[in-house]
Amino acid sequence: MDSALALHRFHFAFTVTFHYIFPQLTMGLALLIVILKSTSLGTGNQLYNRSARFWGRIFAINFALGVVTGIPMEFQFGTNWSSFSKAAGGVIGQTLAMEGVFSFFLESTFLGLFLFGETRLGPKAHWFSAFMVWAGSWLSGYLIIATDAWMQHPTGYQLGPNKEILLSSFWGLLLNPWVGWQYLHNMIGAVITASFVMAAIGSFYLLNGKHLEYAQTFLRVSVPVALVSSVLMIFPTGDGQGKNIARHQPVTLAAMEGLFYSQEGAPLAILGQPDMSKNRLDNPLEIPRMLSFLTYRHWAAEVRGLDAFPREDWPDNVPLLYYSYHIMAGLGTIFIAAMLAACWKLWKGHLYTSRGMLWLLMALGPFPYIANTAGWMTAELGRQPWLIYGLMRTQHGASSHVSAGNTLFTLIGFMGMYALLSVLFLFLFSKEIDQGPESAVQAAH
Amino acid sequence: METTWFCLVAMMIVMYVIFDGFDLGAGVIHCWVARTEFERRMVLKSIGPVWDGNEVWLLAAGGTLYFAFPALYASGFSGFYLPVMIVLWLLMARGISIEFRNHVEGPVWKPIWDTLFSVSSTLLAVFFGAALGNVVRGVSLDASGYFFEPLWTDFRLGKETGILDWYTVLVGLFALFTLTTHGAFWVALKTDKELQERSRTMACIAWWGVAALTVAVTLVTSRVQPHIPARLKEEPWGLIFPLLALVGLMAMRWYLHKREDLMGFLSSCLFILGMLTSTVFGIYPYVLPARTDPAFGLTLHNAAAPPYGLKVGLIWWSIGMILVIAYFVYIYRHFAGKVQLEEENGY
Ligand code: HDD
Ligand code: HEM
Ligand code: HEM
């Protein structure tokens, strides 16, 4: 792999990973804000409305960063992946353009109303603007996931006389069979992030003995949501994703699971480090036959290992793919366990006083970000060595006219810029948390 | 079909320049016309609820360009790699300076963002102008339809051109003056008292720059890109576009004199519309002319996506645009009138 290609890949991976830190909270929080506003509208309890206002402030900071880091994404297909764009732009340009036309306009308009218009709009219309922000961000998620799904599993196209990729069915592109599970899995992942963050802030306030009423509201709303979404994350959506992979990208499945040799009754590896020269897992900790069961619902089914595929079709970073996948799935399991316990305590009425549980909830706050990032690394590394699965290799997609030196220059620029943005974000975020919900209420009046 | 999309993408770009143009312009004059904390908040509040939506025109135009003219998107954005990245950084800096300025009080925090806001808006105006200049001048496309331009070479229009040369810098300055006037009209329209007066004065001064550069750039362009005068000779009805610009330019002066900010702002929109449509008309059927061999130039025919995609695109695009117009009408009416600072400040 020549260095220009490596840099283009890293450039894209770095910027998109950084971007995705923000939309996951945006999309999840948009839903939680709708829940808060609906509860307030339904019960007339102003505490919920004031909580929504507080989270609206956090939302605004987060959204601003999502916007500024999203703008470069839209153009990087052209700048860094020009051969890919020329070949596939007629197809995936559709979904990207639709995202701009249908969802970004919607989001930005209603966010303006949501943030600046509460007094003028009145409670119903303000609820509606919150609802539309949620709808817009989830629509945006759909269209971008449809784009990614097409790269994972291209549909709705035909090859022209010179092997050019021609869109042949608009609905084939939009209703790609890959999209369903991927979209649900990803969006629920966003809800996990938001509900864990809300629970963490609630716990933080309780542990500090501050803003008690708000903190309890946050926990009351977020903990059940977190439990439901954690469960849905594994089943059915994570399972559905796994089935898609088994069917359409069997070599990826083998790499994700660290399965080097085909076997009947394949075990599920929990721990172990892939050794690529010896083709084995070091110190494996495995559950016998589990992989066969999970993939084919049959304990003795044969699962194909990496040896069943030519080496040039293997994902080019098997260990990283393996770790990403295991981190995601491992965290997913931990999330369920933790939230089960928290929900139980909430149900029993002693969550607010159980300091141990509150500490745990607070500590778990950042982990959904890790799980989501690891999940995307699984998807994107698993797609290798293909840029469009089965159609175009990654090495043929990069901008060959843009030299390694120029790519490195802009990569360093982005790194510097994003380091600053991170500091700013953390500063403003903690400031907002420190000021607490009461000050958000004052500022809005 | 290709021509339809050519016009639609051009229209989206015009919308972008008109809408985001005024908040860019407001950024350019921010530090000059708004002296007190109160005034600066007024300027920011006049664009606060709308700037993001305005910027979406850029994203939507980019996306539309991507699917309608993939070869142009691929070649243009990779060839203009460096300026595109710089523009992206500037857009980021500008976005956060608008959003974050009011989050912290105190004498250190705010001046940083005010300065950044002004500087990034100014540079963006220049860069957007220079980008337009590059497209008009043409680039060194090779037979495969790609090129790569360094930021500058020797600032001449020789064999190897860079992004910046005397011509594109001139167009960049032209854009700066145009958007300054445009933004000044907007701020005058949305504010009152001294801030409004200073903005009007600013528009008056910048107008002279616009007028002088309109003449200069028009003369120079007909030399730099002979295709444009040739087109006008071939199809004289196209003179209507520069004529629109001229009417806009004159009307701006008239309404400055009459102190009618709204009409002045609309005249400025007309001027921008006229200038951009003239350019688009002038380089048609090229979307990116070549300085090497005219045959290497990208035209709307060899850069367009196949017909099926363009056809379905037209359906959803039209539906989408109706919605967008509805949002814009609604939000601009909702926030119509002079900015009021006393009421809620948003979150
Ligand atoms: C909170 C985050 C989170 C958690 C707990 C999980 N995932 Fe996940 N996963 C994601 C967040 C995520 C993600 C970031 O949202 C991805 C990346 C692409 C996508 O659509 O979702 C993803 C992708 C992804 C893929 C790759 C899909 C592809 O290649 O397109 C598979 C096979 C799974 N997941 C399976 C699972 C399983 C079996 C889990 C349970 C143990 C699990 N995920 C928990
Ligand atoms: C949903 C829209 C997305 C699209 C269309 C997309 C597209 C791409 C493209 C074009 C590349 C470069 C080519 C390649 O290396 O194969 C890439 C690589 C990558 N992307 Fe994505 N991506 C998306 C989302 C994400 C997200 C949200 C993340 C992470 C949080 C991510 C992580 C990565 C990584 C880690 C790589 C590098 C893989 C490698 O080079 O080996 N992607 N993606
Ligand atoms: C590589 C692919 C991606 C591209 C090209 C992209 C593009 C963009 C752009 C241009 C914006 C700014 C919108 C505005 O100005 O209002 C944005 C924001 C956003 N993006 Fe992405 N994005 C990518 C990946 C993703 C992924 C994977 C998701 C999640 C499913 C996502 C969801 C969002 C959402 C919800 C927003 C709204 C603003 C925010 O979250 O803060 N994007 N994106």
Image: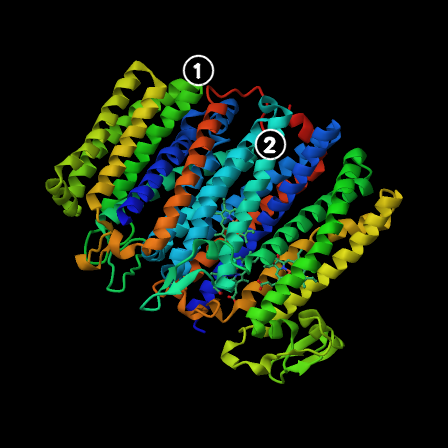
> Vertically, is A257 above or below A193?
below
Asked if the beta carbon under badge 2 is closer than 8 A to the nearest atom of ligand 3, the reply is no
Q: Position of residue A141 (x, y in %)?
A: 55, 49
Give the amino acid type for the residue marked by disc 2 in the picture.
Answer: Phe
Asked if the beta carbon under badge 1 is closer than 8 A to the nearest atom of ligand 3, the reply is no
For the point 59% across and 68% down, which residue is it? A245
Give the amino acid type for the residue marked by disc 1 in the picture.
Answer: Lys
Residue under numbered circle 1: B193
In the rendered image, is residue B229 in sight?
yes
> SS at mark 2?
helix
> Vertically, is A290 above or below B62?
below
For the point 76% across and 59% down, which residue is it? A334
Q: In the drawing, what numbered circle is on residue A433? A: none
> Vertically, is A371 above or below A263?
above
**Which residue of the protein is positioned furthest toward the left in this rendering?**
B233
- Front in this rendered view, residue B42 or B281: B281
Q: Position of residue A178 (x, y in %)?
A: 55, 60
Label 1 in the same subunit as label 2: no
Q: Position of residue B73 (x, y in %)?
A: 35, 54
Position of A396 compared to B97: left or right?
A: left
**Crowd rating for badge 2 (residues with CA inside 10 Å; few <14, some 14–19, many 20+):** some
For the point 41% across and 57% down, which residue is it? A91
Quarter occupied by the C terminus of chain A: top right
In the rendered image, is residue B93 in sight?
no
> SS at mark 1?
helix
Residue under numbered circle 2: A128
Q: In which quarter of the image is residue B216?
A: top left
